[in-house]
């Protein structure tokens, strides 16, 4: 069984990832879409239209108007759009 990672390590990682996403959005622009899975809505936030187009093609049937509660939010960006480096994953 693996030992749980300290909350401070995870908090630091996700704060760094959030800053990377913000930088990527400054360079590439923000695209947001909502997907519906049953009675749940997931908000996807993309840094750049190219990445959104590439990934949303397979999920087009799940696109939703975004009205209602969001149950999860996922931010996506490419390392090249934030300087070519990504924060190291603490669980590796």
Image (cartoon, helix red, strand yellow):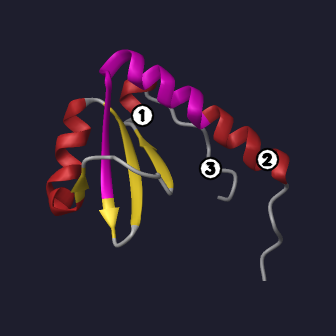
- How many other residues sit within 10 Å of disc 1, few (<14), some (14-19) or many (≥20)? some
Nearest to the observer: residue 62 or residue 85: 62
For disc 2, the marked residue is 9
Structural distance between the alpha carbons of marks 1 and 3: 13 Å
Q: Is residue 1 above or below residue 49?
A: below
Structural distance between the alpha carbons of marks 2 and 1: 21 Å
Q: Is residue 10 above or below residue 29?
A: below
For disc 1, the marked residue is 79
Asked whether residue 78 is drawn in magenta, I would say: no
Q: Quadrant of the C terminus?
A: bottom right
Specify start and end residues of the magenta stretch as a single range. 17-35
Q: Is residue 66 above or below residue 82?
A: below
- How many other residues sit within 10 Å of disc 3, few (<14), some (14-19) or many (≥20)? few
The location of residue 38, given as percent across then percent down, is 34, 73
| Pair 3/2: label in front | 2
Q: Residue shown at 32%/21% (left/top)? A: 29
Q: Secondary structure at mark 3?
A: loop
- Label annotation for residue 89: 3
Q: Quadrant of the N terminus?
A: bottom right
Q: Which secondary structure class fits the magenta region best?
A: helix
Q: Is residue 64 above or below residue 37?
A: above
On screen, residue 29 versus residue 68, left or right, reads left
């Amino acid at each position: 069984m693996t030992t749980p990672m300290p909350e401070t390590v995870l908090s630091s990682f996700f704060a760094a990832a959030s800053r990377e996403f913000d930088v990527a959005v400054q360079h590439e622009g923000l695209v947001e879409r909502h997907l519906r899975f049953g009675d749940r809505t997931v908000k996807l936030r993309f840094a750049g239209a190219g990445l959104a187009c590439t990934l949303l093609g397979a999920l087009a049937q799940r696109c939703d108007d975004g009205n209602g509660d969001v149950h999860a939010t996922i931010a996506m960006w490419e390392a090249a759009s934030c300087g070519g480096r990504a924060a190291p994953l603490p669980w590796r």
